[in-house]
Image: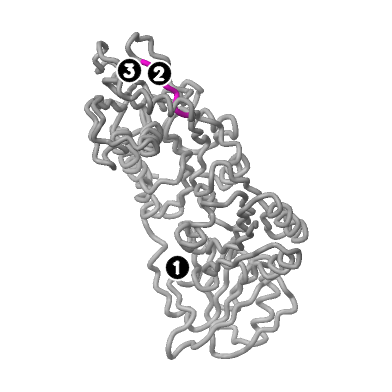
């Protein structure tokens, strides 16, 4: 029986989704997602998972609630696992209750996976406790959308969500209950590296302080604010990375940059070629790998065919350090690594008298050598699912865009256009591809690894 999971994605920080939420997201056949989720979460879905955007922003709803309900019903009747991915918590102003009722009334199984609400998380990231002994023993949470809201006057903390479009009304209501000088905090883009906190008072609230998504905290707890989050060399910089989510870029995030991972291509296994390679492995004296994707698939299929790593007799040749590290994860150290990450150099270093398997993708270059057999174990395919997501991210005006291979750049050009972003390339092959298309590469590391690329971006960020 199909299950619809109403999953809280948390308030913006990618890592604030729960483990349970992430687990079902990885297994989902269909993901119906909102405007305010962190788009990087979509990197964790299966390659063949259906992605349906139903975001709502003030004055512009891509789908009505009735349409969303029907989409969930229709998808649940076609797929085994449907994830309704909602910002914050699905039952805190997220209409999760309405969706739950609609689906269960039609005999569809629904499970709830709570999320961290921005009502608590955003103030915490701004260094403001919503409760503190001796100051506030409780708090109220309101939505700024409703003009029927009754505000309670007491010594607790008042939190308003979704308030940016109705700030004049909210201010008027607050002044009926609180003194004009009551301290307030306006928190924009809470829990992300674009967060900005303004400390003010009720009487000084105005729409210029608000940038959606925003949140308003009212009460004496605002005086306890300690800024622990809004700093870093790159704080507020926006960086688009055209590959799958990778912890290798965490140094940029920890330095304050807001990262957007939008892979422009995905990998599809060529089962026939992988089976052929596994069955004929013994005849090769050299195994050549030009990407970590090839290494991952090779190791996966060794395990599938129960081939013991200790039985490998062939030399291992890899194009560079990041490919070599994939082998090092299982205790295999490459025999041949060129000093520079250039395929021409790699093939020059190989003993041409030995029978070699060149393990690559459909985009791998042809090698005219009698003893080198090209085996295309995977296809590199345009990630059409990410087309709309990529263009939405670019509307946020990126400071940098990172290309980790020629493929990531070429597939990007099929889906979007470059504007004023500073272009970063992982190495000279990628750099040449970009420049051949008339674009200028601003940043390329001397050593062609994600770590060194991040260091170069940090240096550039210090000067920009």
Image x and y of residue 11, in percent: 53, 63
Viewport quadrant of the C terminus: top left
Q: Which residues are magenta?
A: 373-378
Viewport quadrant of the N terminus: bottom right
Viewer-nearest residue: 308 or 140: 308
Query: Can residue 375 be found in the magenta stretch?
Result: yes
Image x and y of residue 18, in percent: 48, 63
Q: Which mark is residue 452?
A: none
Q: Nearer the viewer, mark 1 or mark 2?
A: 2
Residue that label 3 marks:
344
Image x and y of residue 406, in percent: 45, 27
Residue that label 1 marks:
125
Locate residue 202: give its quadrant: bottom right
Query: CB under 8 Å between callouts 1 and 2?
Result: no
Is residue 202 depicted above or below 346 in this figure? below
Residue that label 2 marks:
374
Query: Can residue 132 be found in the magenta stretch?
Result: no
């Amino acid at each position: 029986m199909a299950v619809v999971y109403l999953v809280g994605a948390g308030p913006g920080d990618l890592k604030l989704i729960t483990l349970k939420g992430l687990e079902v997201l990885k297994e989902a056949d269909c993901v119906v997602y909102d405007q305010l989720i962190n788009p990087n979460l979509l990197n964790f879905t299966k390659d063949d998972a259906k992605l349906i955007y139903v975001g709502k922003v003030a004055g512009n709803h891509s789908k009505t609630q009735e349409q969303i309900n029907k989409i969930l019903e229709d998808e649940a009747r076609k797929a085994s696992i449907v994830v309704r991915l909602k910002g914050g918590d699905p039952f805190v102003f997220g209409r999760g209750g309405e969706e739950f009722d609609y689906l269960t009334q039609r005999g569809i199984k629904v499970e709830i996976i709570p999320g961290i609400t921005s009502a608590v998380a955003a103030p915490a990231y701004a260094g403001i406790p919503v409760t503190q002994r001796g100051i506030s023993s409780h708090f109220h949470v309101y939505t700024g959308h409703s003009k029927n809201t009754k505000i309670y006057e007491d010594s607790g903390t008042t939190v308003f969500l979704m308030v940016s479009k109705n700030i004049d009304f909210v201010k008027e209501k607050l002044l009926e209950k609180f003194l004009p000088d009551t301290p307030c905090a306006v928190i924009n883009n809470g829990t992300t590296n674009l967060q900005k906190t303004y400390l003010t008072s009720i009487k000084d609230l105005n729409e210029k302080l608000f940038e959606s998504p925003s949140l308003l905290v009212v009460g004496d707890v605002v005086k306890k604010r300690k800024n622990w989050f809004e700093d870093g060399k790159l704080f507020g910089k926006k960086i688009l990375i055209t590959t799958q989510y990778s912890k290798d870029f965490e140094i940029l995030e920890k330095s304050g940059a807001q990262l957007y991972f939008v892979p422009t291509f995905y990998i599809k296994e060529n089962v026939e070629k992988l089976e052929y390679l596994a069955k004929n492995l013994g005849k090769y004296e050299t195994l050549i790998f030009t990407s970590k994707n090839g290494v991952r698939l090779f190791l996966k299929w060794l395990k599938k065919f129960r081939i013991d790593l200790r039985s490998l007799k062939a030399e291992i040749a890899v194009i560079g350090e990041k490919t070599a590290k994939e082998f090092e994860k299982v205790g295999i150290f490459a025999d041949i690594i060129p000093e520079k990450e250039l395929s021409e150099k790699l093939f020059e270093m190989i003993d041409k008298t030995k029978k070699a398997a060149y393990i690559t993708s459909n985009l791998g270059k042809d090698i005219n050598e009698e003893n080198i057999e090209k085996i295309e174990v995977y296809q590199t395919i345009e990630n059409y699912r990410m087309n709309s997501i990529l263009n939405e991210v670019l509307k946020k005006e990126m400071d940098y865009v990172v290309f980790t291979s020629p493929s990531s750049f070429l597939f990007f050009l099929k889906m979007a256009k470059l504007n004023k972003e500073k272009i970063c390339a992982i190495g000279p092959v990628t750099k040449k591809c970009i420049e051949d298309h008339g674009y200028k590469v601003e940043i390329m590391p001397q050593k062609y690894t994600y770590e060194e690329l991040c260091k170069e971006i940090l240096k550039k960020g210090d000067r920009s």
